[in-house]
Every structure is written in C-alpha cells, then in structure tokens.
Amino acid sequence: MLLIGRRWMWSIFWRKLATRPDKGEKPAAYDAKFVESCWYDFWLANDFFNKSPTSRRRPYIFCLPPPNITGDLHLGHALTVAIEDAIARKHRMCGDAVLWIPGFDHAGLATQLVVENMLFNKNGILRKEMSREDFVRACDVWKTERMASIENQLIKLGSSLSWQRTFYTMDTVSLSHFAIQNFTKAVVEAFKILHQQGLIYRDYRIVNWSPYFCSVISDIEVQLRYVEQPTEITVPGRIEPVFFGRMYFIKYPLENPTAEDEFVIVATTRPETIPADQAIAVHPEDPRYGHLIGLRVRNPLLPGKLLPVICDKRVEQNLGSGVVKVTPAHGKMDFDIAREHGLPLEHRCIDDQGRMEVEELVELDGLERFTGRELVLSMLINRDLLVDCKSHPMNVPICIRSGDVMEPMLKEQWYLDCSELATEVKHAVDRLDIFPAGMRNEWINWTSKSEDWCLSRQSWWGHRVPAYYANFENDCHPSVWVVASDETNARNVIADKYPQYTLANLRQDDDVLDTWFSSALVPLVLGGWPEKFRSDFTENCYFPLSLLETGHDILGFWAVKMAMLSLQLVGELPFRKLLLHGMVCDEQRQKMSKSKGNVINPMQLIQGTPSTETDKGTTAYGADAVRFALLRSNVKADTVAFDKTMLTRSRHFCNKLWQSFKFLKKMWNNDAQVNILSHECTSVVDKWILSRLSTVVKNVNESFETYDFHRCTNDLLDFWWFEFCDVYLVIQRIAVFSFAIVYFQEWSKHYFYPGRCPTAENIVSIFATVTDTYLRLLAPFMPFLAEELYSMLPLENKAISVHDAAYPKADTVSAKYISI
C-alpha cells in the first residue's frame, strides 16, 4: 500500500531501536495535539499491531468494514473505529494475537459519480467523451489518492490496524505470505462456481433503474421519501420541480360501450406510462366490476390498442377507483400480474435515459419523462378523459447518490437465486452470537423475505461480469452466454460445448458486478480462498472471522449476503459473532445529511479548525475525547445520538485526568520510582478505594463481554472523577506532604486509621496501584492519553507500553488489599 507500506517497512527496520518519545515540557492543561503526537509512530515502531498467530492458539481476527473510496470518513466511521479499536486493544492486552484487518471498497457507481464530477469540474470532460480504459485509469488515480487520505484519517483516530494485511476489493495481486488472495480472482471464481451450481442465471425482471446513471441501483442506495400530500421534488436534469403525491382518475372507454357502461375509471399515479399499458385489472370479488371481466377497453392515448379487463386478488378494492392499469415494463406488481396472466411483458414507453419512447405519438416521443407526464395530462383533458386529480400519500423512491427519482424498469440482468441460500442462512442463526439479541429477529426477517439478488450494474467501474456473449456464423445456433474467467477460457468452453458450430463473434458483458457481491466475499478472501477449498479451508486459522462488527442498517445487504456466499462456497458461516451498532444521528436523533446541514466531520473535531476573520474556528478535541464521547452512548441502540455537550464533557474528563496526574507526579517526587502496593492495607479509606477499583475492574470486564461500552466508559469516568479525585485524593493529599504528616497521623488515627497510622510511602503505593490498574483499564477507550499518562508512571519493571501490559481482571486487585 502507500502510506501504510512506508510506515510498516520503517517499523520493521527500527523496531528494536524504538523508545518512548521525549516530547519535551508538558503543557499545564490537557492539549490533545501534544498528547496524540508521536505515539502512533511509537506503536508502529514496536510492531504492537501485528502479532502473528501461533499454531497453538488461533488469532482473534476481524476486519474493519472497508470504507468507500468516495471521500472522507464520517462520524459513523469514527464510531466503528472507536468500537473495533477498543475490542482489538483489549484482546491484545489479554494476550491474544489480534489481526484487525483494514480494507477499502471500490464502491462501484458511487466512485464513478464522484470521478465523473471531478473530471468535469477540473477538465470539463464528460465520461461519454472518454474511452472505458481512460476512465478506469482516472478512477485508479482517484483511488490511490483517496486511500492515502483515508489511511491518514484512520491513523488520526488511533486505529491499531494490522496494516500489512490491508486489502482492496479490486486487488489483482496476492499477499500469499499473509494468506490474503487475489480479490479479483476470488470474485470471478465465486461467480463461476455459483453459475455452475445453477444459482446464477440471467432473466428479465423489474429493477430500480436510475436514468441519471443509466444503471440498476441497489436497494440500499434507494431512499423512500414519504409524501402525504402533493409535494414538489427536484429531479436532476430538470429546471422545474415535479409534483408527487397525486392520483389521477382516467376514463378508459370500453370497446363496445353500452348505455350503462361507456368507460371504466382507472386510478394511477403515473399517467406517463399509459402508452405501455397491457391490461386493466380489478379485484375478482369487487361487485362493481365483476360484469366487466373478460371485456376489453381502449387505451386512452392509443384508441386502436385494446386492453383486456382481468381480475387479480392483488388489486386493492378501496384504493382509488378499485381499478388499476397493468404496465408490466414499469412496475413490479404489474409485471407479476402480467406474467401470471400471460400478457406481453417487454413493451416499454420510457427509455434508459428517462425519455419517452412512443413512436405512435410523435408529439410525445423523446420528451423527458415528467415533461411527458404533463403532455399526457393535457392530451387527456383535451379528450375529456381526465376525470379527477386527488391528493394521495405515497413513497417516492429516490437515489441517495444522485437525487434522481427511480424508474421501475424491465431489464435483463444477472441474478443470484437466494431462495435456498436464505433458508439455510435463516437456520444458521442458532449457530451465531448476535449482539444486541433483538437483532436475531431482524436476521430472520431478512432471510424470510429474501428475493433473488440482481448482480449486474451498468457501470464502467467495478468487477466486470465474467460472462461472454457468443454469436455463431450464419445464425446456425442461437446466441449464448458463457461464463468464464477470461476470453481464452470462454473460447475453449464454446469449442468444447458447440464443436459443430463456427464462432463469429465473442464479447464480454459490459456490465460490472454489484459492489456488495465482492464485499460479501471479504472473510473468504482474508482466509485465503479460493486457493483453499472446503475440506482444508475450515482448518485455516484465518477463517472464520472471530467477529463481524458493522452497522445494523447493512445487516441484510452485507452480513446476510456474506453468510449466504460463505455457506454455499465453503460450508461454514463467515463469522462467529455479530455485533451491530446503531446509526449515528444528531442531538435530535435525525439522520445526518448534507441537505440538513447536520453532517459532522470527525477530523475537524479531532484537529480543530483555525480561526479566520469570519470564523472563530473550533476546538481540537482530540481522538480520545471523540471516541470516548461516542462510546458513552449505547452503541447497540437503533440510533446513536451524538451530543456536543457529551463531547465537551469527555474533553473535560481528559483534562481532569491530566491535572490529577500532574498532582500525583508531584507526590511521586517527579522521577523517583515507586512500587505497587504489596501488603494488606488497614485503613478504611484505602480499603474503600481499592474495593471500588476492584468493582470497576469487574464491571468493565463484564460490560466488555456484552459490548456495553457505555457502561464501561461511564464506570471509568465516575470512578476517577467522583471517587478517586473528589473523595480519595482530597482525603489523602495532606498525608503525603512531610510538613503535615505528624499532624495528619494524630488526627486521622481516630477517624480513618484506627490502630495503625499511614505513611506517605504507603499512600503513594496505593496511588501507584490505582493509577496503574486504571490506565490499563482505560487504554482501549483512550489509547493516546492512557499511553501518555502511563509514560509518567514511575513504576519499576513496567511494560514498554500500556497497550503491551496485561488488561486488569477482577482478581488483579488482590483481596488481601481490601479485606475488611
């Protein structure tokens, strides 16, 4: 890799010479920039993040959900890092060989969009003016720059990642020494195997189509915007906004009208698709229309086109007029109804660019679809066929990348049959530990409603579909699709399968695979697949992952699909535990978005922003305060509200730690070494603080096991601030100064030390015991500050780093210290 490669090589060469950095005089108040400088290089130099597994003990292995290379990290990424880094550091301190593997996702269409915008803004070049090869090269340049930037941001957050194992979801080389295989090879191999098993097929289905991208869009990139009444929505490429939330009532004249029945009133929200209608439908039990079933009506825009009246139980009698139009090329339910009733499926009236495609109506043909809607309504009014227009609540599907209104479109695409896979994954939930436990039901819901997965995307950036379209000379055989790893392999397959026919033309599918397909293979690739298969693969110490930690919003898109592919390809679940965190929201628990102006850049929180003539700038809170503030919320809740007051409180806590250690350092005589308490203490106040410390150690360890980080952080803050500083230090501070020791002994023997007077040395040893234990307990949550303060501890034989020291257990504060 880039930055990480240089850092890693440097650390290998210099690790034996690495010592604690001397940063000079310490500031009077806590300064995040001072504290968080140098330590990351110190950790790298000592290779703390790359302890290799031994044959005797399996590593604790998990991966950072690969951030997209589209831009900077957001607050959700910061939460992920705070959670996962705490887990990684704690396990290392418990003696585990931890592999926390970083990666980057090529992000398909999302990256294509930002690169297109960059090229246009910088050079005035449109993608359609470039060759595919040139555009891919531009994406590669972008990828290199963004990966270096994201790596730096992860370092600023203090991420203790196993950098030399970094993967990229479009890697074409293998890191065989570290078991990570060629990602592109794995994607092709998975596609081939699943196709050979009959699970991947090509078919016509209704898809989420973006006229802006001219591509299928993943469900996760489609946001349903609910409108309760007529609402204007801006659509890319249009000057005027479009009204949504209206239902139109339109007359469809009967083929043979009578005095009683001249027409049928059909209700629709999409009058622009009338030219592609293939039928109208009613509910079979609706008494108003039973006598019309089997008759035909005329298309209101194309009177010569007759449409059958059919019945179907999916029609809602109480919605609109109780009669719907069936337009199979532009609606999922319409497609399902039409297919069951044997109606034509492929006739459409809107093309891939979102323009009207109606050769029979010259005035309509070629218009933008919503401009076409306006003309259709005008035509219906002129023909006296528009009866009414009413307010109608509805969900408008909008692409989160482009803001475009999605167009349901009938397209031939590659699909993965998920029916049996979903059932197997559903039953596998009993073999998983899921946190929070309530997400087990969500897992079951996702696998119960699973539909076949549309794998192909009409993009230039991504893993190209490993399928080839073959034409034969003289049309002696219908054209066929062949799945193969490359063109040579495809030609060999065709020669073996069709030896009697002469190949005329062979071309690879222009489409690329859904980004989630490659992302779902991450645990397999990290484990060395496809070089190792089934029987020997499960013996590999790198598979399955010990833990998958991710946001609950991508449970069905990533975790479930990951389980599907792993179970099918190697027969094992890809992870043993699943931890799902909530979505980071603002203080009002509203989703963060640029349009709302509530997006927070974690780097600005960490580093601060300089003041200008028009802006006062912002405080540099530091990574420790940001991480601690995020973890003080219940990360397993549906939403994690980020409160600036909690961030300020966390920074104040950092300063409280800093000031208290300055005070303790004076009592330690600066550089004089002190010892951990080695004998039973008899004073009530000493027993009390050690008892409280023991309780905190126990509580933090228990909360860690269930990933209740808010309990860990709150217990840590409360103990240090309100018990150790506000009570114990206040009581003991007099005793450690020589000028007051005699007075204190006489005064205190009747209150806190019946039968035995304290010594300053004894109290200082208790200070050392508490602070040493506490810093080791705090280290996973505030890695920089814990390291800085640990370096100030004048202890004999202490570890080179707090992160190399043992994590405190409930029995580490010996019972002999606190027996009362």
Image (tube, rainbow, N blue to C red):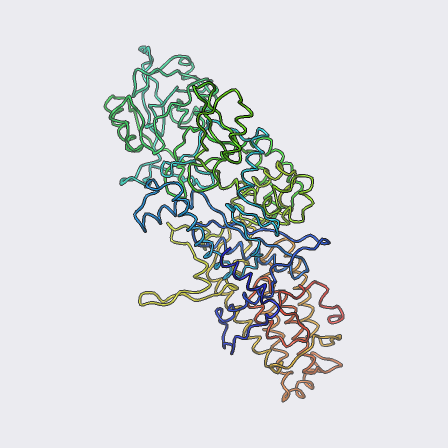
Say above or below: 107 vs 372: below
Say above or below: 407 vs 358: below
- The residue drawn where x is 47% and y is 25% is 503
- Does residue 465 appear to the left or right of 682 in the view shown? left
Residue 765 figure quarter: bottom right
- The residue drawn where x is 52% and y is 44% is 554
Q: Is residue 717 visible from the viewing direction of this image?
A: no
Q: How many marks?
A: 0
- The residue drawn where x is 64% and y is 87% is 738
User: Could you say which is closer to the camera, residue 675 or residue 633?
Assistant: 675
User: Could you say which is closer to the camera, residue 711 or residue 355?
Assistant: 355
Which quarter of the rendering shows the C terminus? bottom right
Q: Position of residue 731 (x, y in %)?
A: 63, 78
Say above or below: 280 vs 632: above
User: Could you say which is closer to the camera, residue 590 or residue 222?
Assistant: 222
Residue 99 figure quarter: bottom right
Say above or below: 105 vs 698: above
Q: Position of residue 540 (x, y in %)?
A: 67, 46
